[in-house]
Amino acid sequence: MIASTIAGLGLAAGSAVLLPEHLSRTGARAAVPQQEAIQPVARTVFVTAVQMSRGSSVRSFPATIAAETESQLAFRVAGKVGAKMVSVGDRIAAGDVIAKLDDTDFQLQLESAEAELSAARIALATETENLTRIESLKSGGWATDRATDLGTAATEEARSRLLRAERNVQLARNQIGYATLRAAEDGVVTHEFVEVGQVVAAGQPIVEAANDGEREAVIAIPEALLSDSRDADATVELWSSPEKRLTAVLTELSPVADPVTRTFQARYRLEDPTGSAALGMSATVWLSRDGQARRAELPLAALHYRDSGASVWVVGPNERIESRDVTIAGFGADTVRISDGLSENEKVVVLGAHKLTDGEPVRPVLTGERS
């Protein structure tokens, strides 16, 4: 039985076999070789060498061509609109009549003021004659000083009433003049707000006019790009003439964000000697800005995030990787711009960043891409 078992194990005849009972009887122990420590295998990673540069960034924004000055014309008095002489698109010149109010009430006020003026003149003439008579009687000893004082006071009061009546007449005439709305500058009507027969308040817009003169491109800038846009060089490309670029200068940047879009309105005055930019045209504003600080541009895949923020994997001198916190200056279509945290020629892992651990040995392979 034992011989057949030995033969089944493939042992040669005559080989020494220690059976369990023999081992227990002799107390011998089988020698077990010690297992060597397993060395970690270096992972192959693709890296790129950091190259810091002072590049320039170019961004584009959709724009609308608008007038440098747009005015909402309104009456200075309240009333009922009796006539409107212009419509949207009409050209207007300074002094042209835009609209008129029904001036019936204003005419009545003028007539009333003129009547008060006439009465004030008669009253002053009467009081002046009375004062002259009193002074004549006083010289003959027939009037007292008190009578003279009363006559003088009545004359001065009549003179003041005359002055007030004259001012009321002037105000009434002004009211009639305010009932006619005239254009202040040459331009074109862009909006209408009221119709004939509508009762309007003083200062309520009647029409909006874009004044002749300089044209501007109006864009909306996100708050993240607000600081960069202040000193950026601007050019404007009209959609109707994409082959021509117009130079533009920033003239106005809103200090308050739009409550809905959270963007800031910016206006750029166009240098357009040929007048090719018409009101309402669509355009593209290109903003270019030279880099003031040295930056490194890396593939987006090189970026990973930790509790401390954005990081990249950097290969150390002993070819072990370490996580490095970086400052992001901006993003491209498939790249990220790093402004702080990296040095020239450092090797950064550009693929598989989410699979690595700090201190892991790696075998870097340079991709040959220039960042």
Image (cartoon, grey):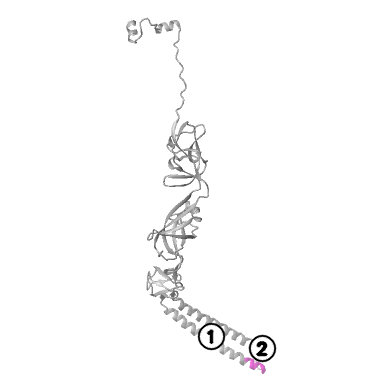
Q: How far apart are marks 2 and 1 (CA)?
A: 26 Å
Name the residue tied to disc 1.
120
Residue 140 lies, in percent from the top left, at 67, 95
Residue at image location 33% in from the left, 5% down from the top: 3
Circle nearer the viewer, 2 or 1: 1
Range drawn in magenta: 134-140
Instruction: Residue type at mark 1: give it.
Output: Ala
Kindly identify which residue carries mark 2. 145
What residue is rendered at 51% in x and 84% in y?
Answer: 117
Q: Is residue 164 left or right of residue 41?
A: right
Place of residue 47 in the rendered image (x, y in percent of width and height, measured from the top left) = 45, 37
Quarter of the image with the N terminus is top left
SS for dot 2: helix
Assess whether residue 136 is covered by the magenta stretch: yes
Residue type pointed to by label 2: Asp
Determine whether 279 is above or below 158 in the image.
above
Where residue 209 sits in the image (x, y, percent)? Answer: 42, 69
